[in-house]
Image (cartoon, rainbow, N blue to C red):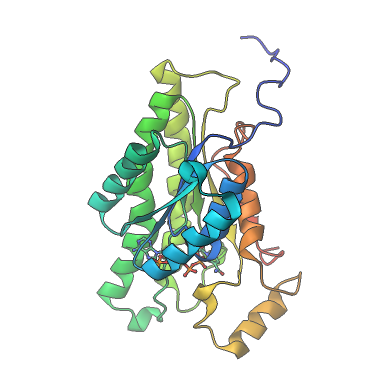
Amino acid sequence: MTITAPFATTTAGQSVQGRVALVTGGTRGIGAAISRSLAGAGATVAAAYAGNARRASDFLDECRTEFGTENERVTAHQSDVSSADECRRLVADVVERHGRIDILVNNAGITIDRTVARMTDDDWQQVLDVNLSGPFYLAQAALGRMVEQGSGRIVMISSVIGETGNIGQANYAATKSGLFGLTKTLAREAAFQLAKSGHQDPYGPGITVNAVTPGFIATDMLEHIPAKVLDRIVGQVPLGRLGRPEEVARLVRFLTDDASAYITGQVWGVNGGLDM
Ligand SMILES: NC(=O)c1ccc[n+]([C@@H]2O[C@H](COP(=O)([O-])OP(=O)(O)OC[C@H]3O[C@@H](n4cnc5c(N)ncnc54)[C@H](OP(=O)(O)O)[C@@H]3O)[C@@H](O)[C@H]2O)c1
């Protein structure tokens, strides 16, 4: 075993240039900011959405204005990630359209809030299907291709609620902490499979899997929270305000960079200090 390593000229300062990224829930809210940030850094982005075709079309128009119409820098893909078959089809569509998949950002998520006493079987199952099973099926479909390519990045958008729990969010909190175990297991399996595949460059980008836990971020998801409750929440945030989608996207962009090759299996907070 040698302890000397080559000076990091191969990865330092590199980016997501030329990479193909799939961002679920990628046409609005935090996902749209992630799609924009990756496209702005030179990646090709497949932004997936569930049913809001109007928003997806507006988002594509905004991206054409921002990034130009050449090379299809951003494409939109309709898919319901609560279905295992649709997850597999979505990954296959991205590969067919763009030739590969380098980055998967599991961002799509829903809330159906009710206390445990009132939660129906359906409330429980729907949130599990979208927030936890979807990321599993998508990662399963993408990982094999990343191993063949010899590199890849998977980022799970979890939540601070996965760390703290929250009244009325048993289903949501369970899915968001479930993503921690999924992230760490995938990180280990990805490293193991890549080493076994013979496609590994020990100082290359490799395959990493990380989770990000946003705090309270100003998107449509917070719309149903009464103003009074929101004020109380903001009062508990040491930085004294809601986060912006771009502030989460900044971290995702960092984690997906080729140079972030030695960061895997970790949970990263973006919450204004809420969980200190
Ligand atoms: N906002 C926050 O304060 C906050 C805090 C912590 C964590 N998060 C997490 O961050 C992620 C993004 O949140 P956000 O606030 O940006 O949410 P949002 O504005 O409500 O957007 C949710 C996105 O998920 C997509 N989606 C919903 N159900 C889907 C399904 N069955 N299949 C495929 N896509 C589906 C939606 O597609 P359509 O556009 O087609 O409806 C939409 O693009 C979520 O995982 C959320 O749990 C958010």
Q: Residue 93: give x, y in percent of width and height.
A: 31, 44
Comparing 208 with 93, the one in front is 93
Q: Residue 89: give x, y in percent of width and height.
A: 27, 46
Picture quarter with the N terminus: top right
Comparing 261 with 16, the one in front is 16
The answer to whether residue 47 is visible is: yes
Picture quarter with the C terminus: bottom right
Q: Residue furthest front?
A: 69
Residue 56 position (above or below residue 84): below
Q: Residue 153: give x, y in percent of width and height.
A: 50, 38
Identified at 60% across, 88% down, the residue is 227
Identified at 28% across, 45% down, the residue is 88
Residue 208 position (above or below residue 121): above
Q: Is residue 154 left or right of residue 48?
A: right
Q: Is residue 106 left or right of residue 226?
A: left
Identified at 28% across, 78% down, the residue is 120
Task: Give the quarter of the image for residue 54.
Answer: bottom left
Comparing 58 with 157, the one in front is 58
Q: Residue 129: give x, y in percent of width and height.
A: 31, 61
Residue 5 position (above or below residue 154): above
The answer to whether residue 267 is visible is: no
